[in-house]
Image (cartoon, rainbow, N blue to C red):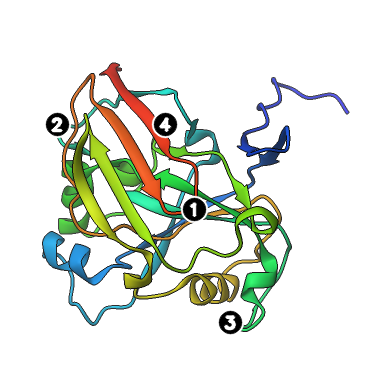
Amino acid sequence: MNFAVQVPEVVAVPVAGTGTFFPVRRIYCVGRNYLEHIREMKEADERDPPFFFQKPRDALVLNGQLVPYPPQTNDFQFEVELVVAIGKSGRAISKEKALDHIFGYAVGFDMTRRDRQRESGKNGLPWEIGKSFDACAPCGNLRTVADVGHIDHGRIAVSVNGQVKQDSLIEKMIWNVPEIVSNLSHLYDLVEGDLIYSGTPAGVAPVLTGDILRGTVDGLIDLEITIGTRT
């Protein structure tokens, strides 16, 4: 097969302790999945259900890498999240079978141009400008279910330059992981290589050039990134 332009590079996340990589097909994100975050944002009814949006897979940034401060924003914010990696395809998966489709877990950051996101919401426009841009999806090394089991409780936190900013518990999610996988699979076919960022707790805040972010989820490998200069 002859291609008219260069074929895009494979995007993949290292699998801890295996020497292998998890190739990424799609990145799904869950919005409004922690009650305290809904309250701090003051932009939705607490009774509104969580919802899904996507980020481009080439927005992935690996552990230890630089995240350039993006253009067209003066309010660049972090959101620490539990990332779920799909290892078995499925459609309309039941909650009872959802865990069978999970390959592993990682720590992720949903980086956000908050000013652009708010403008879009106020004007009834799509969120892409605020949520789906270059280098907006840092993801740490995956740990497999065989290695760590299923992550259904424990601390989730992020520090900026050593100061804790977000600090909560996985069990405070409105939708738990099986419910997320099941609900998403009724909207899209889930396929090996899909990543799901499962939502963020309260405490989101802006970052500046030179800031070092460290995300933590109990049982997983910490994710550390540095904010680079403006692009």
**Disc 1 marks which residue?**
219
Q: Secondary structure at mark 4?
A: loop
Residue 58 on image: x %, y %? 53, 34
Precedes in sequence: disc 3 or disc 2: 2
At a point 74% along the width and 22% down the height, the residue shown is: 4
At a point 54% along the width and 74% down the height, the residue shown is: 178
At a point 16% along the width and 43% down the height, the residue shown is: 205
Q: Quadrant of the C terminus?
A: top left
**Disc 4 marks which residue?**
135
**Disc 2 marks which residue?**
74
Q: Residues within 10 Å of mark 4 (few under 14, many from 20)?
A: many
Task: Report how far apart the C-alphas of labels 4 and 1 lie in the structure.
Answer: 25 Å
Query: Picture quarter containing residue 3?
Result: top right
Q: Which mark is residue 34?
A: none
Q: How many marks?
A: 4
Amino acid bearing label 1: Gly
**Nearer to me, 91 or 21:** 21
Q: Secondary structure at mark 3?
A: loop
Are discs 3 and 2 less than 8 Å apart at CB?
A: no
Name above or below for residue 200 compared with residue 71.
below
Q: Nearer the viewer, mark 4 or mark 1?
A: 1
Amino acid bearing label 2: Asn
Amino acid bearing label 3: Lys
**Disc 3 marks which residue?**
95
Residue 42 on image: x %, y %? 11, 65
Residue 151 on image: x %, y %? 51, 63
Task: Report how far apart the C-alphas of labels 1 and 3 lie in the structure.
Answer: 23 Å
Amino acid bearing label 4: Ala
Q: In the rendered view, does 124 fall on the left or right side of 64?
A: left
Q: Secondary structure at mark 1?
A: loop
Task: Report how far apart the C-alphas of labels 4 and 2 lie in the structure.
Answer: 16 Å
